[in-house]
Image: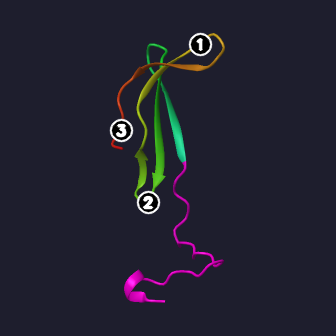
């Protein structure tokens, strides 16, 4: 194996890549905030290495007659 070509050791066929030492940090969770007019503000957050970060868009929803949230307004996307 030519380390100058690859720059690092490459596992051979059938060998597994070594796992990283960091724990799983990619769990996305929604946050529901009830507004004063009865609507719901929904934001999505992920727990990263530096703490909580907002990852998805901000949407405003209302509850329909069946108990489901229906999007009525989209307040744009977050940083990604």
Residue 62 locus on image (x, y percent): 52, 16
The residues tagged by marks 2 and 3 sit, at their Cα atoms, a distance apart of 18 Å
Residue at 52%, 37% in the rendered image: 30
Q: Count the marks.
A: 3
Overall secondary structure of the magenta section = loop
Residue at 52%, 53% in the rendered image: 26
Residue 44 locus on image (x, y percent): 47, 38
Query: Among all residues in the image, which is located at the extreme top?
Result: 65
Assign a secondary structure to mark 1.
Answer: loop
Q: Which residue is mark 1?
A: 64
| N-terminal label among 3 and 1 | 1
Q: Local crowd at mark 2 within 10 Å, few (<14), some, or many (≥20)?
A: few
Q: Quadrant of residue 77?
A: top left
Q: Which residues are magenta?
A: 1-27
Say whether residue 7 is visible: no
Is the Cβ of the residue at disc 2 closer than 8 Å to that at disc 3? no
Query: What numbered label is drawn on residue 49?
Result: 2
> Is 30 rendered above or below residue 75?
below
Assign a secondary structure to mark 2.
Answer: loop
The residues tagged by marks 2 and 1 sit, at their Cα atoms, a distance apart of 37 Å
| N-terminal label among 2 and 1 | 2
Direction from residue 16 to residue 43 in the image, left or right: left
């Amino acid at each position: 194996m030519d380390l100058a070509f690859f720059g690092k050791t490459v596992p051979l066929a059938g060998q597994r890549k070594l796992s990283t030492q960091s724990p799983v940090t990619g769990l996305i969770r929604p946050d529901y905030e009830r507004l004063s007019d009865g609507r719901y503000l929904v934001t999505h957050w992920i727990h990263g290495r530096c703490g909580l970060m907002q990852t998805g868009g901000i949407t405003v929803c209302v509850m329909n007659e069946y108990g489901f949230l229906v999007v009525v307004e989209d307040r744009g996307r977050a940083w990604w």
